[in-house]
Amino acid sequence: MDSGEMKALIIRGKQDAIIDTVAIPKVKPNEVLIEVKACGICKTDIEIFRGTVDLAKYPVIPGHEFSGIVVDVGRDVTSVSKGDRVTVDPNIPCGKCYYCRTARKHFCENWNAIGVTLNGAYAQYVKAPEHVVYNIPNNMPFDAACLTEPVACVLHGLHRISPSSGSHIAIFGAGPIGLMFLQLLKEVASRIIVFEINPYRSKVAEKLGADYAINPLETNVEDEVSKLTNGRGVDIAIDATGNVKAIETAMKILAPTGKLLLFGVAHKDAVINIRPFEVYRKELTIMGSFTNPYTMNEAIGLLMKGVVNYKELITHRVQLEDALSILAKGLPKEGIKVIITKFA
Ligand SMILES: [Zn+2]
Ligand SMILES: [Zn+2]
């Protein structure tokens, strides 16, 4: 490997990934080159490997949740310099289209994303345009900083539902996302009920402040929620699974004026059953949450404050080679967040 080369994991197509030596990206005038220090393994990366992400472009180096050190900047870059510690919003809006000009950059008509349509951070180096690069505080560990993007996505979801204090909240799924919602909501909620089928993850949910962590396969969810809420139901239900059964159940346990947030990625052809009468009679709201517009700085702040405690979420630190088998076999059952910390 000569000095202009780096190691990277490349997804060449459906179910086809290798680790290879490739050229280190060259920066354009507006771009920044980052030496990757930590990169989260996201379910999306696994889905890109499985070929279920329509937006993905092959071949691609995955990895959209990362942090590192700036090692080169293009000649027009002014807001970051060599040696800066940074994280990146992987979504790259064009700034020119209708949605970019109407405060909805996450629906950019010329959207690209690092690790999805452009090469990402399952590599020693990754490049990004300056306007999506965020400086992080000197005392923020790279491990914490690589969680900025998922936390930012969760924050966008929270802004969508704008929970009022004292709410009764149900969270379906205690993976990294469900547990981030839990950590961010536990001060504002009067009660949080987590539904999770994996016993390891249920335990973590309890440790992180869930009032109840219930296995939905072992109980009648509607009866249980009714018991715990004096028959009223929950004010907010958050789906962090994308599972049809979970979403239908979440609809049924909402109290009057309840809100359902669809955060987990359902299969694009999946269909749920809704009784419109219920929506009418209880004034229910169903809403989605897509990516992380305008929430990166807020996420950095909340990770720094420990409101989202990265130490409780990161259970595995692996090297690039291990990522290959995780893409093929899935994430470890007894774990929450897996991050890559060794790339060379
Ligand atoms: Zn992700
Ligand atoms: Zn745009």
Image: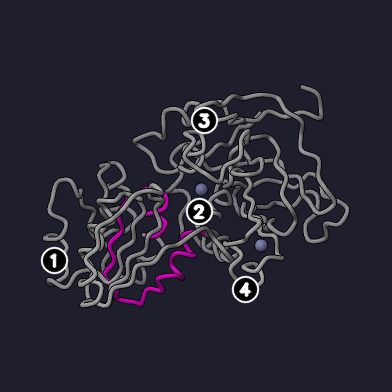
Q: Which of pointers 2 and 4 indicates the residue nearer the eye?
A: 4
Q: Earlier in the sequence, mark 2 or mark 4?
A: 4
Separation (CA) of disc 2 from disc 3:
24 Å
Amino acid type assigned to the residue bearing label 2 in the image:
Pro
Q: Which residue is labeled 2 in the image?
A: 150
**Mark 4 to mark 1: distance in Å?**
42 Å
* Residue pointed to by mark 1: 226
**Hey, which residue is sitting farthest top in the picture?**
1
164 shown above or below 83: below
Query: In the figure, is residue 333 to the left or right of 160?
Result: left
Q: Above or below — where is 155 with respect to 140?
A: below
- State left or right for residue 168 relative to residue 36: left
| Residue 110 relative to residue 3: left or right | left
Q: Quadrant of the N terminus?
A: top right
- Check disc 3 and report the residue beneath it: 14
Q: Quadrant of ligand 2?
A: bottom right
Chain part drawn in magenta: 153-181
Dot 3 or dot 4: first in sequence order is 3
Circle 4: element type: helix
Instruction: Indicate the quadrant containing the C terminus: top left, top right, bottom left or bottom right.
Output: top right
Q: Which mark is residue 102?
A: 4
Structural distance between the alpha carbons of marks 3 and 4: 36 Å
User: Is label 1 in contact with label 3 (beta carbons under 8 Å)?
Assistant: no
- From mark 2 to mark 4, how far is it between C-alphas? 24 Å
- What amino acid is found at the position of numbered circle 4 in the picture? Thr
Q: Which of the two discs, 2 and 3, labels the residue nearer the N terminus?
A: 3
133, above or below 325, in the image:
below
Q: Does mark 2's beta carbon lie closer than 8 Å to ligand 1?
A: yes
Of callouts 1 and 3, the N-terminal one: 3
**Is 198 included in the stretch rendered in magenta?**
no
